[in-house]
Image (cartoon, rainbow, N blue to C red):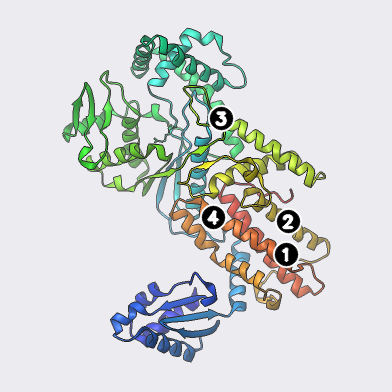
Amino acid sequence: MNERHRIVQILSQGLGVGTEEIDTLLEIPSDRSRGDLALPCFRLAGVLKRPPADIAKQAAADLSEKAVAGLASVEAVGGYLNIRFDPAVQAKKVLQAILDQGERYGSNEVGAGKTVVLDYSSPNIAKPFSVGHLRSTVIGASVGNLLAFQGYRCVRINHLGDWGTQFGKLIVAYRKWGEEVDLEGPSPIKALLKLYVRFHDEAEADPSLEDQGREWFKRLEDGDPEATSIWERFKSLSLVEFQRMYDRLGVEFDTYSGESFYNDKMQPVIDRLQEKGLLVESRGAKIVDLEPHGLTPIIIQRSDDASLYATRDLAAACYRHETYAFDKNLYFVATQQNEHFKQVFKTLELLGEPWAKDCVHVAFGLISFAEGVMSSRKGKVIFLEDVLDQAVERVDRIIAEKNPELPNRTEVAEQVGVGAIRFYDLSRRRIKDWVFDWARILNFDGDTGPYVMYTHARLSSILRKGVERGMSPLREAASIEFSALDNPEAIEILKDLENFPRAISRAAEEYEPSILAQTLVDIADHANRFYNAHHVLVEQPSVAGTRLLLVACVRTLLRTGLGLLGIAAPEEM
Ligand code: ARG
């Protein structure tokens, strides 16, 4: 912002305070009726040994004298200097920026040369892809988009849960009852889940099954061919189903190196723990005592030498650092694993890894259903695929009612149904728990995905109608007719446009897509208010062209925003 720069210089000279100090003090007031920029003079009062109101007055005088281009007014109110820009100048600036940058508006290069590793989705093979994994998938994917938009190199990892004692159990169940389930059908995971549930039922009566399970996992770890081939079958059957989900969600990964990938990479970590004297024996197992750090012990090796989830995460973190030299290593996993990640990061720190501080557990809350808690051991799970199908079906019914003529209804219903679930998942602070509620998720007129998508479609339709009548948005912001935008509704939108890049940066920095989702809802609200209050396609070409330009810019932002959240923006719905 050029004016800002100029203002900082003038104030710094006039008051005899460093430019940096002024720059940090200058703020955009949360109550914009106070102005577009304000300088609170209270901290300066201490340095300059003058009352704040006095400083504000002098600052106002200094600025007025210099007649900075684009300034509408300066005013001292108590200890504040309030600055207002000329709205016409501001409007031209932001509209031109969007014209120039299109769907890149809001992007920047703060992350250039930096690498972020993102571990997300990471479902467990042979188990259903749950709604909890959906959260990890959509939050991780959209934070990846946001970071890439800020210039970061992103490495997207699906840390599949494809290793651990449960596969020993499943192998036992498969060898005993595998014939009785349909692994070649449309949902092999449902068949595998049956085996898993059966195992736990039978193990209640016959605890020796548990021992057999442990034994088979040991065999798997030791490379036994039979165990390996059964496990590979579980894995490939599961991946086909997961892939179906990822295709539908439009989610991609750079690598699927899951837990099994670290089977031969754990020993060096265990050795280093040993060398550092961190490994202690406890009831036959090897652990790191984290009690001095207020954490429960982390188990590194079981009494039968089998490795654990945490051991693999330690190896994975070291591998990622060696391979990608990351600046940040992010884990998108539910809050239930808070303790686990604290243990892992603390252990890395104790190992003397300076990059332990760059590992972040990006936690999120639970989704619950009216139907009750999920438990894969009891076979009580809600399959994501069923949830998506239902969403699409419901949206299809809504469209049939609202817009029966829509030509590509099936495609749009899929986009809106999947988008609705996705948006809902991203629209609340990620740490919050939430309850699945169809009426809210699919509301075309609430703070929802369908609402934002619908607003985008309406703006698109205004632009199409304009073309039909030979009216198009202005191509140069310099030629806008500002009086066409000089109303509270349009001014509100212009502020949205101006603030959009900041919302994106904040969402990226805080790993919080909800900031962007909420911003999109606000923009959609303001856009609706604008076109309900003002005609866009009016006689006077300069007014129509100006308002169409505003409409086109809002539409661009909604597209960009939805895209960053991984949601389609249909032209019509
Ligand atoms: N597979 C785990 C689960 O479903 C999540 C893995 C998360 N990533 C990690 N590196 N631990 O609970």
State whether label 4 is within 8 Å of ligand 1. no
Residue 507 in sight in this render: yes
Residue 18 seen in the figure:
no
Name the residue beneath numbered marker 1.
531
SS for tag 1?
A: helix
Q: Residues within 10 Å of mark 1 (few under 14, many from 20)?
A: some
User: Residue 222 at what x, y percent from top left?
Assistant: 33, 17
Secondary structure, mark 4, is: helix
- Residue 146, position as x, y percentages in the image: 50, 52
Going by the numbered disc 1, the residue's amino acid type is Tyr
Sequence-wise, the earlier of marks 2 and 3 is 3
Q: Residue at x 82, y 65 (%)?
A: 470
Identified by mark 4, the residue type is Leu
Q: What amino acid does circle 2 point to?
A: Arg
Q: Which residue is mark 4?
A: 516
User: Is 283 drawn above or below residue 524 in the view shown?
Assistant: above
Pair 2/3: label in front: 3
The residue positioned 40% from the left and 82% from the top of the image is 79
Residue linked to disc 3: 382
> In the rendering, which numbered label is found on residue 458?
2
- State the residue at coordinates (31%, 30%): 311
What's the CA distance linking mark 3 and mark 1? 41 Å
Closer to the chain start, of discs 4 and 3, is 3
